[in-house]
Image (spheres, rainbow, N blue to C red):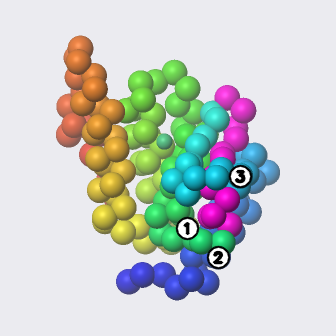
Amino acid sequence: MAMTKQELVNFHNNVWLKYHKHIKIVFENEKDDDFHAFVGSAKVCLPKSVKTNQSEWTLLCFLHEIGHIMTNTCNMKRYEMEFLATQWALDEAKRIGFVVMNKDIQRFQRYINGYARKIRKNPPDLKDLLLKY
Ligand SMILES: [Zn+2]
């Protein structure tokens, strides 16, 4: 069942409260789909619109960016970084009681697979990159 607007606001606020002391979290990106993590400086940049327009998708993206910091994926291939950050986000969602929608998991799965398919030499097996939830 979809969350209410207030539940979505509360989840976003609680994620911010839980991590903002260790991770610099800023809401400054102009584009609504511009979520970014800077692993070296432990900084997460989210769209401005997430301050007022929260959804299940923006919550999962928020957790995914925190996941980049928490999994410290600096020196990995892009598909590995994206897989680990997303798996961390799904595990964290379970810990905080956020029920992730299957369509949003599949959207991230396609994103990960897209990077994995770009690897020509010793390409990874997509079965090893299946998100678990
Ligand atoms: Zn990512």
Mark 1 residue crowding within 10 angstroms, few (<14) / some (14–19) / many (20+): few
Specify the quadrant of the image occupied by residue 126. Answer: top left
**Mark drawn on residue 43:** none
Q: Nearer the viewer, residue 117 or 67?
A: 117
Q: Are marks 1 and 3 in contact (CB under 8 Å)?
A: no
Split into 4 quadrants, where in the image is the N terminus?
Answer: bottom left
Q: Nearer the viewer, residue 83 or 94?
A: 83
Q: Earlier in the sequence, mark 3 or mark 2?
A: 2
Is residue 36 shown above or below 89? above
User: Could one spot residue 100 in this view of the protein?
Assistant: yes
Q: Amino acid at mark 2?
A: Asn
Q: How much space separates mark 1 and mark 2, taking CA atoms?
A: 11 Å
Q: Is mark 2 within 8 Å of ligand 1?
A: no
Give how far across and how far down residue 25 sits, in percent: 72, 50
Picture mark count: 3
**Residue 82, magenta (yes or no):** no
- Of circles 1 and 3, which is in front? 3
Q: Secondary structure at mark 2?
A: helix
Give how far across and how far down residue 85 sits, in percent: 48, 43
Q: Amino acid at mark 3?
A: Glu
Q: Are marks 1 and 2 in contact (CB under 8 Å)?
A: no
Q: Residue at position x 24%, y 30% from top? A: 117
Q: Earlier in the sequence, mark 1 or mark 3?
A: 3
User: Could one spot residue 92 in this view of the protein?
Assistant: no
Query: Which segment is the magenta one?
Result: 40-51
Q: For mark 1, what is the residue?
A: 96
Q: Secondary structure at mark 1?
A: helix
- Of circles 3 and 2, which is in front? 3
